[in-house]
Every structure is written in structure tokens, then in C-alpha cells.
Amino acid sequence: MKADPEKTRIKEKRRLGLVLVLTGEGKGKTTSCLGMAVRAVGYGMRVVMIQFIKGALHYGELDGAKRLAPEFELVPMGKGFVGIMGDTLEFAEHVEAAKEALAAARRKMLSGRYDIVILDEINVALHLRLVELSDVVSLIKEKPENVHLILTGRHAHQEVIRLAHLVTEMRNIKHPFDLGIEAQKGIDY
């Protein structure tokens, strides 16, 4: 005898969109978000990741994201690492890119098309003063009730932490860089 699908189906609760913050000096903030994106896509959810710093270099998640399309969209909008690793851009160019990324994030978050919106490295953009705290707080407060919003990056501002439902701090205990081992393809980029 077959089970009645209506009786055996787990009733899905109404989704309460959470604000999650992944911060700290340790590795794994973006990678954790990518794992959540894969999980969400598995449930048929739509996810967008706006990257506030990355954008100038090629890294594996760009190609991986294409394999999860159209449910997962990765939008690198940064101009690269600010003030390090051979950055030759004027600071104002980084500011403009971050402002454009914040505006794009707001449009996508309010569009009704996405279940999860990831703001990758926005905490760094805020720390470097590429975006204003008031603008980030406003975006968090505008979040639709059913959308999950994830903010990543070192140096999360205390006000962002206060507004979050979940905050995870990644702590570096040991890193291959400390042993002179260069970044590894598929692990670090």
C-alpha cells in the first residue's frame, strides 16, 4: 500500500528571512556562503551573490556558479583588493564600484526574484569606508520578510552584528600561508 503524499509530506513552515553575518580573520566566509547557495539551489531556491571586493581576478567560483545557473547568480562588482596586491586604482574607483554593488544588491533583494541574497565582503567594504554604515543598515532594514540576507567579510561593524539573527566568527588557528605554502587552486581561489 502506497503512502498518501499529502499525509506524509512535511509541512513547510512560512519562511522567516534571516540576517546572517560571517566575519573574522579565519578562512571560510565566502566558502560557507557558497555551501549555503548549493544547499538552497538543491531546494529550488534562487540565490544571488554580489561580490564587493573581488572582481579583478579569475577564481573558481566564477566557473562553478555557471554550473548552478539559473538558480545561482554570481555578480563580481569589485575592482579587486583595495590598497594591496598591486592595486593601482584610485580609491574613488573602489568607492564607486562599492556604491554600484550596494545599489545592485538593493535592487536584487527587493525584486522578489531571490530567496537568498549574499553580500560577499561587504563588511570589508564598510571597514574600508567604501560604503557608508547608514546605507548598509538601511539595506538590512529594507530586507523583505521572506528573504535571507548574508553579509560576509572581516571586521563586521557592531551595528551590523546587532541587527543580525546569526553571527559566526571564523578564527584562524593555523594556515598554510604561515608555513610558506602558496594559495591552492580549488581551496583558496
Image (cartoon, grey):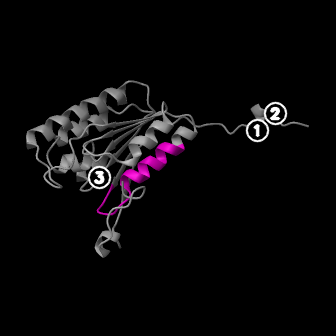
Q: Residues within 10 Å of mark 3 (few under 14, many from 20)?
A: many
Q: Residue at x 43, y 53 (%)?
A: 32
Judge from the rendering whether residue 132 lies leftward or rightward of residue 62; answer left or right.
left
Judge from the rendering whether residue 76 lies leftward or rightward of residue 48; answer left or right.
left
Viewer-side residue, 170 vs 93: 93
Q: Sequence order check: which comes first, mark 3 or mark 1?
A: 1
Q: Which residue is mark 3?
A: 153
Q: On screen, 30 above or below 143?
A: below
Point out residue 55 in the picture as x, y percentages from the top left corner. 27, 42
Point out residue 104 in the picture as x, y percentages from the top left corner. 28, 30
Q: Which residue is mark 1?
A: 8
Q: Secondary structure at mark 2?
A: loop
Q: Residue at x 29, y 50 (%)?
A: 162
Q: Which residue is mark 2?
A: 4
Q: Secondary structure at mark 1?
A: helix
Q: Residue at x 45, y 43 (%)?
A: 64
Label the magenta part by its dominant secondary structure. helix
Q: What residue span does the magenta drawing correspond to?
A: 23-39
Q: Given the image, on which type of amino acid does mark 3 rest?
A: Gly
Disc nearest the viewer among 3 and 1: 3
Residue that extends furthest to the bottom in the rendered view of this protein: 179
Judge from the rendering whether residue 25 lies leftward or rightward of residue 19; answer left or right.
left
Q: Secondary structure at mark 3?
A: loop
Give the CA distance from mark 2 to mark 3.
Answer: 46 Å
Q: Sequence order check: which comes first, mark 2 or mark 3?
A: 2
